[in-house]
């Protein structure tokens, strides 16, 4: 391969990207065609003109890291088309574990296509395969970081198939049904047109709701293990969590506090999805058993939620918020207001 490609002259051969393939996965496959490492490949194109800097891991590679015009010219795609293949912005780091669908890799192999990594699998909320409806298989980000060539995907998939990690995992007497987690993905990630029960909601607002509810469920469960929607989780719920900052297409940032391990995210997000779909926490055994959860939702940052959303999820919390608002209108933001709010919150749970 020549040092760089002249304008209008792309590489002589560029393998076609698989549907939904991640930018870094595709670039690894192109580099393999020319017998180069990803770094050498990008350097020779002039797309990575920084000899003294560390190239991001292939799965974290984003258009902003590269000389995009040179890369787009070489692979004969527009910068916009390339941008559609990059991973969602996630700062500061990725979850400790991501998930892949071995069935998707098998289906691609059956069609004669090589193994690849899907852009979709990079999202912290991706827990279920949207094609097969099955739980994604955990893979450690450090194992992904060890991948140097696209052919390494085959070995990775083989190891996952033969390891206990890929076995269907069970809760109680049967496998955990991923229906609610899949629904949550369709609303928050895929944006397939599926609406939450209270109506159309901007994705940033949905992520805020998911974040608050996820933290509330983890806090409620830590305070009272064995109760509520995570009550079936008999392992230690001292889950390691991290804050993931997602960058939306419009530049808006949303924060999600989630477990770093995939199995924990799957359990938690399935419960969050169940609460959002079915409403009223009472159905999940939480209103009676955990007034702390209602207090959390009433006092958490739910100000930007649609009123109908909080009323759907926890009517008691919505009522408390409404009464706090009435006090604010009556008393303004004054010491009397905060004193009255404290009394309101204490009184609301005095009988429980
Ligand atoms: Zn699949």
Image (cartoon, rainbow, N blue to C red):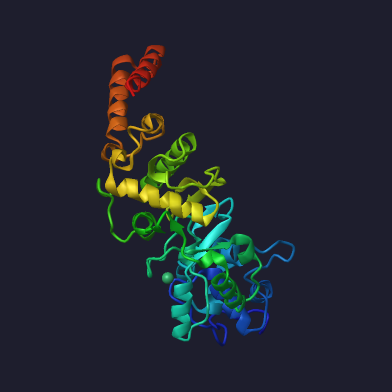
Compared across the picture, whether 199 is left or right of 110 comes to left
Compared across the picture, whether 114 is left or right of 319 comes to right
Q: Quadrant of the N terminus?
A: bottom right
Residue 201 seen by the camera: no
Compared across the picture, whether 233 is left or right of 74 comes to left
Q: Quadrant of the C terminus?
A: top left
- Which quadrant does ligand 1 occupy? bottom left
Q: Residue at 64% across / 84% down in the picture?
A: 34
Q: Position of residue 90 (x, y in %)?
A: 53, 54
Label tally: 0
Q: Position of residue 210 (x, y in %)?
A: 40, 46
Quadrant in the picture for residue 48 = bottom right
Q: Residue at 38% across / 41% down in the picture?
A: 228
Q: Position of residue 218 (x, y in %)?
A: 47, 41
179 lies above or below 244:
below
Residue 282 seen by the camera: yes
- Find the residue positioned furthest to the top: 336
Q: Position of residue 287 (x, y in %)?
A: 33, 34
Q: Residue at 47% across / 86% down in the picture?
A: 112
Q: Residue at 40% across / 47% down in the picture?
A: 207
- Find the residue positioned furthest to the front: 173
Residue nearest the observer in this picture, 10 or 151: 151
180 lies above or below 321:
below
Quadrant in the picture for residue 340 = top left
């Amino acid at each position: 391969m020549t040092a760089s490609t002249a304008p209008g002259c792309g590489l002589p051969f560029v393998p076609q990207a698989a549907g939904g393939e991640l930018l870094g996965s595709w670039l690894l496959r192109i580099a393999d065609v020319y017998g180069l490492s990803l770094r050498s490949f990008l350097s020779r194109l002039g797309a990575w003109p920084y000899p003294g800097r560390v190239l991001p891991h292939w799965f974290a590679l984003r258009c902003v890291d590269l000389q995009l015009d040179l890369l787009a010219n070489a692979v004969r795609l527009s910068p916009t088309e390339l941008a559609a293949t990059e991973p969602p912005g996630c700062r500061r780091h990725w979850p400790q574990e991501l998930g892949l669908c071995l069935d998707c890799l098998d289906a691609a192999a059956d069609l004669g296509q090589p193994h690849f990594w899907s852009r979709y699998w990079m999202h912290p909320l991706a827990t279920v395969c949207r094609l097969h409806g099955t739980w994604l298989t955990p893979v450690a980000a450090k194992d992904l970081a060890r991948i140097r060539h696209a052919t390494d995907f085959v070995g990775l998939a083989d190891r996952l198939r033969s390891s206990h990690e890929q076995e269907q995992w069970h809760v109680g007497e049967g496998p955990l049904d991923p229906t609610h987690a899949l629904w949550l993905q369709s609303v928050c990630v895929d944006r397939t047109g599926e609406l939450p029960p209270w109506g159309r909601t901007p994705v940033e607002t949905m992520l805020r709701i998911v974040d608050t509810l996820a933290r509330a469920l983890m806090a409620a469960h830590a305070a009272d293990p064995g109760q509520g929607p995570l009550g079936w989780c008999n392992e230690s719920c001292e889950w390691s969590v991290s804050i993931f900052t997602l960058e939306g297409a419009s530049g808006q940032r949303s924060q999600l506090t989630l477990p770093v391990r995939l199995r924990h995210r799957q359990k938690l997000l399935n419960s969050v999805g169940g609460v959002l779909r079915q409403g009223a926490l009472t159905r999940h055994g939480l209103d009676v058993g955990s007034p702390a959860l209602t207090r959390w939702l009433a006092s958490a940052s739910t100000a930007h939620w649609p009123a109908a959303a909080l009323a759907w999820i926890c009517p008691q919390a919505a009522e408390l918020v409404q009464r706090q608002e009435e006090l604010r209108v009556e008393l303004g933001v004054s010491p009397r207001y905060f004193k009255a709010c404290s009394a309101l919150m204490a009184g609301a749970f005095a009988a429980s």
